[in-house]
C-alpha cells in the first residue's frame, strides 16, 4: 500500500458510511429545527420500513424502482456519461409498458404481456435516450443539458398524451384505463400469502430487478462491450487508439442506460398501479443518481443503496403518519443531504482518513 | 387585435422577469466555470424565504433581503462543494434542487400549517405595481398611449430592475476588471492562477452573485407576481432559465431576448388555451410549453448557430498535483 492510498474496505465501506452519518446528522438537525425529537423520528422510520410485514413489502417495492434507475445512471457513469435524464426515460418507458399492456391484456396471460411490456419499456426508454446520445456523440452537445431538456419534453408530451389520447372516454382523470388481469404482474402477497406482506404492492418486478443486476454485472465486468465502455469512460483518448469508436460506445451505452430506466415502469405501471398515471416517476429517476453514486456503480452496491433509499421512502411515510409535524417532504430533504454528502462532498472526509491511515502505516513501518 | 397584442406582450414582460433574473444569475456562475443546474432550487428557496419574511415583517424589502440571504446560502453550499471540495457540480446542483424542494414545504408546514404555503400577503407586504409618470395623461394618445400606459407602465419594481440588470451585467462582465477575470477563469483557470489571482475567491464571488440574482428571481415569484409562497412554485423556471442561458450563448443581451422569447411562448400558451388558429385548428398548450426545451436542443445540436460553453466549465480547478 503506497502513501495516499486506502485499503478497499475504507474506500468502499468507511468513507460512504462517514458521508451517510454526516447526512443523517444534518437531517437530525432539521428535525430539531421543527421542534421534534430526532431519535423518536429514527425509531419510527426504522419501525416503518422494517418493523412489520407490510412495511417491509413497501420498502422492497420502492427498492425495486431505485435499482432500475440506479443501474441506468451507473451504466452511463462507466462510460463517463452523466445521464441525468433517467426521469424522462423512465416516464416514456412507462408509456411503452402501458401500450403493451393495453394492447395485450385482454387476450393473453400476464407472463406473455409481461414479455412485451419489458421490450416496450426498454425500447421506449432507450429511444428517449437516443437523441441526446447521438447529439453528444456526433455534435458534442453536452449530454447533461440535453437530457434535462428531454425530461421536460417528456413531461409535456405525457401530459398531452394522457389528457388527449390515452384517456378513456368519459373519464376526467388524465390516465389510461385500468389494465385487466392479463396486464397485471402478480403481487408477492398473492403468491406467498404466508409472508404477511399486508397490502404492500411489491411484485414480481423485484426479481426482474435482481436479474437485471446480474446482467449488468456481466455486461460491465465480463463482456467485451463492457470492457470497451469502461475503457472509454476511463480514458476516451486512449480508447480511440485502441480502436474503440466513441460514437458507437456513447450511443450504445446511453441506449442501455435509457432502457434500464424505462424498465422502472414494470414495477410502478404494470406491477402496482395497473394504469399509466401522470408523474408516476415521482423523482425516482433523479434519486437514481444518488443510488449510483452511493453504490459506487456496482450492482451489489446499487442493491444496498436502493434498500437504503427504499427504507427512507417507506420509513418517511410512516414518520409523516406518526409525527404529523414532519411531512413526507422530510424524505426529500434526507435524499438531498445524502446526494450532497455522498455525491458532491464525496471527498469531505478523505484527507482526514488518509492522514489517519498514513500515520498508522508509518508507525507500522518504523 | 392591437389590444390583444398589447395584453400578450404585457404578460410576456411579467413572465420573462423571473427567467431573466435566473438567467443572468446562471451567466455569472457559468462564465466562471461553475455549471449550475441548481438555479431552480435557489429560486424556490428564495421564494419561500421571501414569502415567509414578508409575512412576518409586513415589508417586501425584508422579504427580498431574506430571499437573497437564503439563495446566497444555497449558492455557497454549491460553491463549497464544487470549488473547495472539487466535487461534481451537476450532482451538487441536483442536491440543491432537492434540498429546496423538501425544506420549503417541510418548514412551511411546520411554521404556518397551510399545506406548505406561506400565508396570503397583504398588498403592503408585496412589491406593488408602479404607474410611471405621465402614464395616465398619455393614456388616450393613439398607439403610443396604450403602449406606454398598458405595456411599459404598471409593473412592479422588480420587473424594471430585471431589465436594468441586463446592461449592468453586460458592463460588469465585459467592461470591468472583475468581468475580464471572470471570463478568463471560465476559459483557463490555470492562466488566471499564474497571473497571481485567486481562482477560488474569483469563483466564490461569481457563485455568490449568482445567488443574489436567484434571490431576486425567487422573491419576484413569491411576493411580486403572487401573494405568497406556494409549494413548488418555481415549476421548472430555473431550468428554462438555464436553457435560455445556453440559447443566448452565455451573453447578457441575447439572454434578455431569449428570456423575452420564452416568456412570450408562455404568455401565448396561456392565451391560446382552447382557441383555434385559422387553418391549423387548436394547438395543444403543451406544444408551447415544450418549445423552449425543443429550441434549446436544436440549438445545441448546432443546426441554428453553435452554443459553445466556457471552456473550463464543469471542471474543478486543481492548483497542484499531490
Image (spheres, helix red, strand yellow):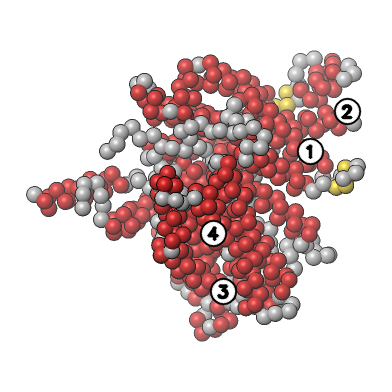
Gap in angstroms between the C-alphas marked 2 and 3: 59 Å
Disc 2 with disc 3 on a shared chain: no
Gap in angstroms between the C-alphas marked 1 and 3: 45 Å
Residue at screen point 53% across, 83% down: A192
**For the residue labelled by badge 3, is the local secondary structure a helix, a strand or a loop?**
loop
Disc 1 with disc 4 on a shared chain: no
Residue at screen point 62% across, 19% down: B167
Q: Position of residue B304 (x, y in %)?
A: 67, 34
Gap in angstroms between the C-alphas marked 3 and 4: 23 Å
The tag on residue A256 is: 4
Q: Is residue B151 above or below residue B300?
A: above
Task: Using the image, name the chain to which the residue with label 1 belongs.
Answer: B
In front here: A118 or B10?
A118
Q: Position of residue A339 (x, y in %)?
A: 45, 50
Task: Using the image, name the chain to which the residue with label 2 belongs.
Answer: B
Name the residue carrying label 2: B2
- Based on the displayed image, in which of its 4 quarters is residue B2 positioned? top right
Task: Using the image, name the chain to which the residue with label 4 belongs.
Answer: A
Amino acid at each position: 500500500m503506497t502513501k495516499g492510498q486506502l485499503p478497499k474496505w475504507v474506500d468502499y465501506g468507511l468513507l460512504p458510511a462517514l458521508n451517510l452519518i454526516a447526512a443523517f446528522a444534518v437531517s437530525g438537525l432539521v428535525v430539531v429545527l421543527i421542534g421534534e425529537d430526532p431519535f423518536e423520528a429514527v425509531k419510527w422510520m426504522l419501525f416503518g420500513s422494517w418493523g412489520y410485514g407490510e412495511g417491509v413489502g413497501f420498502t422492497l417495492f420502492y427498492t425495486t424502482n431505485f435499482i432500475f434507475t440506479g443501474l441506468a445512471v451507473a451504466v452511463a457513469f462507466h462510460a463517463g456519461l452523466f445521464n441525468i435524464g433517467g426521469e424522462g426515460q423512465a416516464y416514456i418507458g412507462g408509456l411503452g409498458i402501458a401500450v403493451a399492456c393495453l394492447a395485450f391484456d385482454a387476450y393473453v396471460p400476464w407472463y406473455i404481456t409481461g414479455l412485451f411490456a419489458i421490450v416496450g419499456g426498454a425500447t421506449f426508454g432507450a429511444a428517449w435516450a437516443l437523441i441526446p446520445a447521438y447529439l453528444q456523440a456526433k455534435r458534442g452537445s453536452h449530454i447533461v443539458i440535453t437530457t434535462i431538456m428531454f425530461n421536460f419534453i417528456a413531461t409535456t408530451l405525457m401530459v398531452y398524451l394522457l389528457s388527449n389520447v390515452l384517456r378513456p372516454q368519459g373519464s376526467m382523470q388524465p390516465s389510461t384505463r385500468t389494465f385487466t388481469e392479463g396486464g397485471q404482474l402478480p403481487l408477492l402477497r398473492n403468491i406467498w400469502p404466508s409472508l404477511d406482506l399486508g397490502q404492500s404492492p411489491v411484485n414480481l418486478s423485484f426479481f426482474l430487478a435482481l436479474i437485471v443486476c446480474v446482467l449488468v454485472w456481466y455486461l460491465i465486468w465480463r463482456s467485451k462491450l463492457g470492457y470497451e465502455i469502461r475503457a472509454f469512460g476511463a480514458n476516451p483518448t486512449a480508447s480511440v487508439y485502441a480502436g474503440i469508436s466513441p460514437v458507437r460506445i456513447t450511443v450504445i451505452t446511453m441506449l442501455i442506460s435509457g432502457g434500464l430506466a424505462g424498465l422502472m415502469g414494470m414495477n410502478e405501471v404494470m406491477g402496482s398501479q395497473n394504469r399509466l398515471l401522470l408523474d408516476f416517476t415521482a423523482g425516482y429517476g433523479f434519486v437514481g443518481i444518488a443510488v449510483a453514486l452511493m453504490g459506487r456503480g456496482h450492482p451489489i452496491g446499487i442493491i444496498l443503496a436502493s434498500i437504503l433509499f427504499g427504507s427512507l421512502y417507506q420509513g418517511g411515510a410512516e414518520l409523516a403518519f406518526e409525527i404529523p409535524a414532519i411531512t413526507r417532504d422530510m424524505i426529500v430533504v434526507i435524499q438531498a443531504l445524502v446526494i450532497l454528502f455522498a455525491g458532491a462532498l464525496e471527498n469531505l472526509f478523505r484527507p482526514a482518513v488518509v492522514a489517519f491511515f498514513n500515520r498508522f502505516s508509518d508507525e507500522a513501518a518504523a | 387585435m392591437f389590444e390583444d397584442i398589447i395584453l400578450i406582450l404585457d404578460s410576456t414582460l411579467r413572465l420573462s422577469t423571473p427567467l431573466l433574473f435566473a438567467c443572468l444569475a446562471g451567466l455569472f456562475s457559468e462564465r466562471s466555470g461553475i455549471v449550475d443546474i441548481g438555479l431552480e432550487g435557489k429560486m424556490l428557496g428564495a421564494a419561500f424565504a421571501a414569502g415567509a419574511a414578508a409575512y412576518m415583517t409586513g415589508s417586501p424589502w425584508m422579504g427580498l433581503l431574506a430571499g437573497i440571504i437564503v439563495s446566497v446560502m444555497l449558492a455557497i453550499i454549491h460553491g463549497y462543494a464544487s470549488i473547495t471540495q472539487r466535487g461534481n457540480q451537476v450532482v451538487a446542483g441536483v442536491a440543491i434542487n432537492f434540498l429546496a424542494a423538501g425544506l420549503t414545504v417541510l418548514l412551511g408546514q411546520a411554521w404556518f400549517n397551510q399545506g406548505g404555503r406561506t400565508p396570503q400577503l397583504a398588498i403592503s407586504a408585496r412589491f406593488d405595481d408602479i404607474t410611471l409618470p405621465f402614464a395616465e395623461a398619455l393614456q388616450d394618445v393613439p398607439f403610443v398611449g396604450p403602449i406606454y400606459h398598458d405595456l411599459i407602465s404598471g409593473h412592479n419594481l422588480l420587473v424594471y430592475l430585471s431589465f436594468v440588470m441586463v446592461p449592468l451585467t453586460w458592463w460588469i462582465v465585459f467592461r470591468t476588471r472583475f468581468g475580464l477575470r471572470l471570463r478568463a477563469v471560465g476559459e483557463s483557470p490555470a492562466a488566471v492562477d499564474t497571473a497571481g489571482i485567486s481562482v477560488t475567491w474569483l469563483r466564490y464571488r461569481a457563485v455568490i452573485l449568482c445567488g443574489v440574482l436567484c434571490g431576486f428571481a425567487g422573491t419576484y415569484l413569491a411576493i411580486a407576481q403572487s401573494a405568497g409562497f406556494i409549494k413548488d412554485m418555481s415549476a421548472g423556471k430555473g431550468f428554462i432559465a438555464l436553457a435560455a442561458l445556453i440559447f443566448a450563448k452565455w451573453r447578457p443581451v441575447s439572454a434578455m431576448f431569449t428570456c423575452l422569447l420564452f416568456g412570450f411562448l408562455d404568455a401565448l400558451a396561456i392565451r391560446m388555451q382552447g382557441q383555434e388558429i385559422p387553418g391549423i385548428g387548436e394547438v395543444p398548450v403543451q406544444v408551447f410549453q415544450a418549445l423552449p426545451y425543443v429550441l434549446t436542443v436544436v440549438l445545441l445540436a448546432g443546426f441554428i448557430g453553435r452554443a459553445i460553453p466556457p471552456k473550463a466549465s464543469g471542471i474543478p480547478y486543481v492548483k497542484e498535483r499531490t
